[in-house]
Image (cartoon, grey):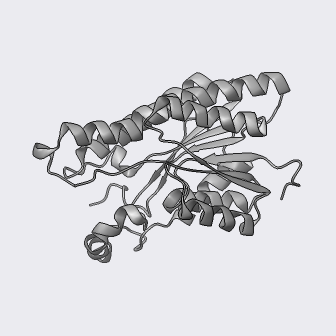
Amino acid sequence: MHSKKESRVAVITGSSRGIGRGIALELAKLGYKIVIHSQTGGHAAQATRQAVLDAGAADAICLEADLADIDQSKSLACHVFNHFGYCNIWVNNAGIAPDIRLDLLETSAESWDKVLSTNLKGPFFLTQTVANLMIKHNLLRKTTHPAHIVFITSISSTVASIERGEYCVSKAGLSMVAQLFACRLAGLGVVVTEIRPGIMATDMTSGVKEKYDRLIAQALVPEGRWGTPEDVGKIVAAIARGDLNFSTGAVVTVDGGLTIPRL
């Protein structure tokens, strides 16, 4: 574990609950200073802050921003670098599902715009800002330790769900965004990694728990269980330790074997 003076800084968007919270807890165990981001703050964000401090974080702060608003997202990134002076790992995790799952033939333009603004447009321009700040920091400090940007996408990048088409499109687009930034930042001291979770036990899937309980029991997932936020957090912790420093652009699937082609 790093001393408080030496501790590295991690930002996880959408980390007051779910996968983001699981990532924050795993990085806290490594002694990171943690920035907990949420759209509106509140009790969940404060509870996560206390949990990461209890888990070993050197420090933890809560910040609010609507990442669909480009100005707010830029302000978030600038606040982090102004406050800490640097950021070692930035995790683009925040995302939303459609308010109502509708058949592809009934998807509304309003739902499309809302989901893609939050899940795709927002992370693209936020990452643009973060990358520029990371490059500037690396040049000024002449650091030899790479910074990391992680995109939490989904198996929905490649697995079609016709009752939430806008979500699938947003995640497919975000997968390409990860590849683009990996290419652009290679050699500039920033490593980019994409993580694709499968069926995860979070608030987002609580409304379809019965459905997936049944499908998992029928061997949909070879490992025979739901994924957990901790499963994703452990992959991010490996990235934060530097285990994937020569793997920029890598796609890590965390789905218990769900997307393995099978007969």
The percent position of residue 128, horizontal first and vertical second, equals: 55, 26
Residue extending furthest toward the left: 105
70 vs 54: above or below: above
Could you say where residue 111 lies in the image, as x and y percent from the top left? 25, 43
Q: Residue at x 40, y 36 (%)?
A: 120
Res 43 quadrant in image? bottom right
Q: Residue at (57%, 59%) from the top-left corner?
A: 45
Q: Does residue 199 appear anywhere in the picture?
A: no
- Quadrant where the N terminus is found in the figure: bottom right
Q: Residue at x 68, y 47 (%)?
A: 10
Tell me residue 132's x, y (percent). Answer: 64, 24
Nearest the viewer among 16 and 194 is 16
> Is 262 or 4 nearer to us in this picture?
4
Which quarter shows the C terminus?
A: bottom left
Looking at the picture, tell me which residue is in the foreground, 51 or 43. Answer: 43
Q: Is residue 209 left or right of residue 64?
A: left
Position above or below: 149 against 253: above
Quadrant location of residue 86? top right
Percent position of residue 207, x then y: 29, 68
Please, is residue 227 above or below residue 11 in the view?
Answer: below
Residue 162 in view = yes
Tally of marks: 0
Q: Is residue 87 left or right of residue 197?
A: right
